[in-house]
Amino acid sequence: MSTAYKVIVNGQQQLTVDSSQGTLLEAMEAAGLEPHYHCRNGFCGACRVQLVQGDITYINEPLAFVRPGDCLPCCCVAASDLEINQ
Amino acid sequence: MSYSTFNQNQVNPLLEPMFFGNSVNVARYDQQKHSIFEKLIEKQISFFWRPEEVDVSRDRVDFQALTDSEKHIFISNLKYQTLLDSVQGRSPNIALLPIVSIPELETWIETWSFFETIHSRSYTHILRNLFTDPSEVFEDIVINEEIQKRATDISRYYDDLIFYTQLWQTHGEGEWEVDGEKHLVSMRELKKKLFLCINSVNALEAVRFYVSFACTFAFAERDLMEGNSKIIRLIARDENLHLVSTQQILNLWQYGQDDPEMKEIAEELRDEALNIFMKAVEQEKQWAHYLFRHGSMIGLNEEMLCQYVEYIANMRMEAIGFDAPFKQRSNPLPWMNKYLVSDNVQVAPQEAEITSYLVGQIDSNVSASDLGDFEL
Ligand code: FES
Ligand SMILES: [Fe+2]
Ligand SMILES: [Fe+2]
């Protein structure tokens, strides 16, 4: 099964992420997007982005409250093509 | 109404609201209404640390070499943090335990407050190392006007909730006169006071430490006061968890996943909650001003600190459903992040010494002599 997906950020930038190669946050950093983060472990909520479209999978269950329409890239991977707002 | 340490009525905690339901009787965690609090307890306990395990002895030499304005910054921050943790080491217990109704939240509150007492003890550890007699520093905390201003705002909402809970638990609902002043005690009023109190604590955990954290880590960036910085990293990690818990409570209410009356109150008092947050942000900026009034320090000035407060505040406010009020969307102090990363993850390569996870994970086969030059 392919783990490579397209991610559109802020409606413009597009990157390809490989879910087997690390978290969405790491993929965003590798693409030079400078995402916010503190704990990198799902418990501070600093990395929160809007998930406009698509599915993600949490590799660690976050402790921070994830409001509807948001996701925490530090502890998830893409499970489909995505559209997110930073 | 009156509190019982073991409520003898049969109650089903799965059907209780977080607060102001039946008081908790059996401390059981096999079933949870809000399992998040059980997870927070586990996480917090896994973070256990002891201040004495962190070697702060080299800081004394560093401290003596600081300029007077840098000493003022360093000591003032420690005073302010001492105030914050003095309040937090007792208030969640005193204000929230008498009204909590589910066991996992009750235990979270106790765990949370306990960790705040570790923070308090760590300030004594730091100060004892810097001064032969740290009394003067501690004594100034109740005299210093700048700290006083903050203390008033921090304790106010707790005190109000505690007082009304006491009236309610001794007299019940009604209008009661105490020292010539009338107080209307109703469940609605109590819940409003609870809502404001949690918002005030949330703001405390969210922004009130960060000016001080930034200064500590700015010293560490210059390889100064590193023992202190290791302790503050551990504290910062704990504070993040505390913040998550208050954000959870506020969001559970807002999304109607707990007491429906609290959802109404959250809507009704939205502006007041916003004001509490904005006032905390304002006070932090004033604190930055106070810190730098005798001069700034290398790598940090008042303006950068205020921008950082705004940056943090935006994030924290969005987490509880407010719009980000400030323009500052990028991180003005990018080096802060490496100190705030939880050590589960490898941080920047120069961070050779990982501050935590060593605590409590020492292999039981290791003999004392193996630990001779063990360093945290
Ligand atoms: S960085 Fe803390 S939750 Fe993602
Ligand atoms: Fe604390
Ligand atoms: Fe705290």
Image: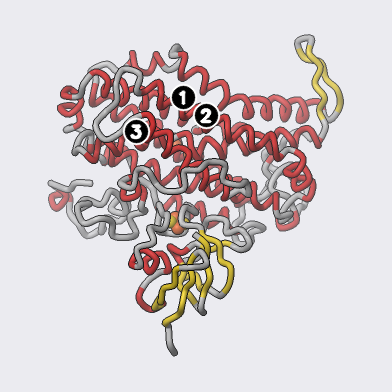
Q: Quadrant of ligand 1?
A: bottom left
Residue at the image position 37 percent from the left and 37 percent from the top:
B213
Number of numbered tags placed on the structure image:
3
x and y, in percent, of residue B107 in the image: 57, 47
The residue singled out by tag 3 in the image is B122
Question: Is B375 on the left-hand or right-hand side of B259?
Answer: left
Q: Is the residue A84 above or below the residue B307 in the image? A: below
Label 2 Cα crowd, 10 Å radius (few <14 / some 14-19 / many 20+):
some
Question: Is B28 on the left-hand or right-hand side of B144?
Answer: right
Q: Choose mark 1 or mark 3, whichever is in front.
A: 1
Mark 1 vs 2: CB contact within 8 A: yes
C-alpha separation, residue under disc 1 versus residue under disc 2: 6 Å
x and y, in percent, of residue A25 in the image: 41, 64
The amino acid at mark 1 is Gln
Q: Earlier in the sequence, mark 1 or mark 3?
A: 3
Q: Is the residue B277 above or below the residue B160 in the image? A: below
Which residue occupies the extreme top position in the image? B180
The residue singled out by tag 1 in the image is B286
Chain letter belonging to callout 2:
B
Label 1 Cα crowd, 10 Å radius (few <14 / some 14-19 / many 20+):
some
Residue at the image position 42 percent from the left and 82 percent from the top:
A4
The residue singled out by tag 2 in the image is B282
Question: Can you tell me whether the CB of the residue at mark 1 lies under 8 Å from the nearest atom of ligand 2?
Answer: no
Label 3 Cα crowd, 10 Å radius (few <14 / some 14-19 / many 20+):
many
